[in-house]
Amino acid sequence: MHVAPYSSGCGGIVSGIQLASITSDQLIDLRLAFSTYGVLFFRDQNLSPKQHLEFAQRYGKIVINKFFKTIEHHPQIAEVRKEKTQQTNIGGGWHSDHSYDEIPAMGSILVARTLPKTGGDTQFANLYAAYDALTPELKKTISSLRAVHSNTHLYGENGLYRMTDLAEQLGGMDRVGDATHPVVINHPESGRKALYINPGHTITFEGWDFNESRRLLDELYAHVTQPQFTCSFNWLPGSVTFWDNRCTWHQANNDYQGQARLMHRITLAGTPLSAA
Ligand code: OGA
Ligand code: MN
């Protein structure tokens, strides 16, 4: 197994490994690479749904998304689907998965099933690097803050996603909820500090009003999305991406109108987050 940086500041590309038949030694190396890079890219894997599931189960414990449809026979595998007639996509803005949960998901393993001819990349951001590069003043300002994360504005009754042509693919309107988390976490595995807020789900800083929160959140978001902390992954048939939701963000480019795209996602359970 070989791992190389995917871009100067974001992600690792793994070669010399087949996730469908990974050895115990390779699994140890993979855990180390995952902890180092936060997001790993793989080519030419051609995982069947069953092999996708088996790999996920070897790596950790699966959690099921509350809102996405699942595939036939495998309720642990969520569909991230865009039909060719559909305008809105899932995950089209920067976010990390499940930050609205009390114990947010550790990671997500995404497998390409149907791809547009061009476009449909997924972008990633490195929240370790982004945190490290903050000014000492900003680090001090956010050091003891907590933030409120929610999904109600997306999946709730009048949520953004419910107002679009994505609505028919979503269930769980009654399962919306909030959670609060430290803004700077001590990553449970690497022990490194990571910025833990995201544009998709973070609403306010705890105890701050909306506008005051908005100003600082926007400043932090503009910092994170700079090119030196981000990368864009171009999917090919057989590609797999495995990211850690506690130290990365992602977003799906919606630049392939008129074409279909289908991905399969398995989400792995995390552990409680603690402040750095
Ligand atoms: C997800 C997601 C991105 C993509 O599966 O959580 O945001 O590129 N998908 O489909
Ligand atoms: Mn996502």
Image (cartoon, rainbow, N blue to C red):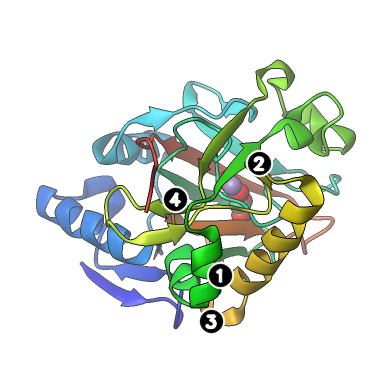
Q: Residues within 10 Å of mark 1 (few under 14, many from 20)?
A: some
Residue 156 percent location from the top left of the image: 77, 26
Tell me the kind of residue under disc 4: Arg
**Marks 2 and 3, how far apart in space?**
32 Å
Image disc number at residue 207: 2
Query: Do callouts 2 and 3 mark residues in contact (Cβ within 8 Å)?
Result: no
**Marks 4 and 1, how far apart in space?**
20 Å
The first of marks 1 and 2 along the sequence is: 1
Q: Quadrant of the C terminus?
A: bottom left
The first of marks 3 and 4 along the sequence is: 3
Considering only vertical position in the picture, is 34 above or below 272? Answer: below
Point 29% across, 36% down: residue:
60
State the residue in front, 149 or 260.
Answer: 149
Nearer the observer: mark 2 or 3; the answer is: 2
Q: Is residue 35 left or right of residue 24?
A: right
Nearer the observer: mark 4 or 1; the answer is: 1
**Marks 3 and 4, how far apart in space?**
19 Å
Image disc number at residue 246: 4
**Marks 1 and 2, how far apart in space?**
18 Å
Element at label 4? loop
Considering only vertical position in the picture, is 2 above or below 56? Answer: below
Q: Quadrant of the N terminus?
A: bottom left
Element at label 1? helix
State the residue in front, 155 or 89.
Answer: 155
Tell me the kind of residue under disc 3: Gln
Image disc number at residue 138: 1
Q: Residues within 10 Å of mark 4 (few under 14, many from 20)?
A: many
The first of marks 1 and 3 along the sequence is: 1
